[in-house]
Image (spheres, rainbow, N blue to C red):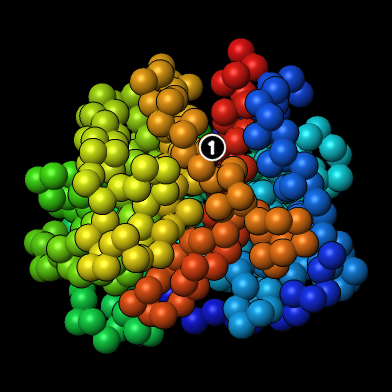
Amino acid sequence: MKHSILFLFGLIPLFMFGCNAPKETNSNFDLSDKYQQEVLEVAKQQLGYQTKVIEDSGRFMNPRTVEKGFVRYVGNHDWTSGFFPGTMFYMYDLTQDQKWKDLGVKYTETLESVKTLKSHHDVGFMINCSFGNALRVTNNEAYKDVIVEAAKSLSTRYREGAGVIQSWDEDRGWQGERGWSCPVIIDNMMNLELMMKATQFSQDSTFWNIAVSHADQTMKNQFRDDWSSFHVVDYQKETGEVRSRQTAQGYSHESAWARGQAWAIYGFTIMYRYTKDPKYLQMTDNIYNFIFNHKNLPADLVPYWDFDAPNIPNEPRDASAAAITASALYELVEMGETQYKATADKIMESLSSPVYRALVGTNGNFLLMHSVGSIPHKAEIDKPLNYADYYFLEAMARKAELESI
């Protein structure tokens, strides 16, 4: 998660309420598992309430989380802005109800201005999760132009000397107080899919080469011997020298921030999908082994917010990290790595249980409870998050597609 300055688009009190796979829309999803049916029914109601509030407002209010008893809505340039529009398309995949597709298109098209955003790296999250899914579901060729333009914007953050896409500007915001030169966060692996798609749509290999360079430098510099990830690597942007390895959202510089591990396994899964380079597949296996053999991973496979947090087992869980990981594992299964399915299924069983799945009419009409934004920033601790829901439904759609074959 990134903590740039956020715009509060609106706050609605709770008492008013009663990224990419599957590869193509499939109307024969197998939802025979009882828990999947239950989850989908809850999702229809929760998101139905959420979208009713939005539609009744007469404008698009983009829900991110719950804050002080209110739903927090954010503006187009918030890093999470693409997740809720993308969620609509996964609801369409899972239900084949046209209303979700229509809402997805409507909400996605409000974000077109993001394609020219150059102030941070999250344009990949924002555009790929919205327009990428919109293109997949609707085949509207105009969305390709948006994706290519967004990739051009992201490319302006590429530092040739270091071979990486700079995540945050070093001279503004709280990041500007850290003394960094060219900070790169593990989350940035998630933005590489935008670059790969842009090459496919434009036939310009520049985007592809940037993505491969960034992934290779991340693989080289951002992992410890046990395959846990540093959150932040600061490069000397002209030479590529590593200046420091730190954290911004984990417990300590040497700890393993849970969502960072999730971004990593998902990001290298993306790179393997596009390149078929076995080194990226090996990275996913390395990261998997770190996560699922860690002594502090709970039995339900939903991690604490940091694997090295000091007060385990009395530390918050991060359902978002679990959902991201499950979705990545299902994609690996789609690519033939069937050994990961049992783990992904176990994660989904846990997230679908009453421990993590909200009751209808509660939780600000988000699906999952118990996620963590950033404990060091005292932000979004033990809260619902729109990206937790997004990756949870993406994982559910991937699971359903696998089981329909």
Most foreground residue, 59 or 204: 59
Q: Position of residue 157 (x, y in %)?
A: 36, 63
SS for callout 1: helix
Q: Is residue 343 visible?
A: yes
Asked if residue 85 lies left or right of residue 168, the reply is right
Q: Which residue is mark 1?
A: 349
Residue at 20% across, 74% down: 181
Q: Position of residue 269 (x, y in %)?
A: 38, 35
Residue at 30% across, 47% down: 297
Above or below for 314 versus 7: above
Q: Position of residue 238 (x, y in %)?
A: 16, 65
**Which image quadrant: the C terminus?**
top right
**Which image quadrant: the N terminus?**
bottom left
Most foreground residue, 138 or 55: 55
User: What residue occupies the far top of the structure in this picture?
Assistant: 405
Asked if residue 127 lies left or right of residue 247, the reply is right
Most foreground residue, 196 or 107: 107
Asked where in the image residue 316 lies, by quadrant, the reply is: bottom left
Residue at 46% across, 77% down: 379
Q: Position of residue 204 (x, y in %)?
A: 44, 39
Q: Is residue 216 visible?
A: no
Asked if residue 354 lies left or right of residue 191, the reply is right
Above or below for 5 versus 190: below
Amino acid under disc 1? Glu
Most foreground residue, 352 or 327: 352
Crowdedness of circle 1 by 10 Å Cα count: few (<14), some, many (20+)? some
Residue at 65% across, 49% down: 86
Above or below for 153 versus 90: below
Q: How many marks?
A: 1
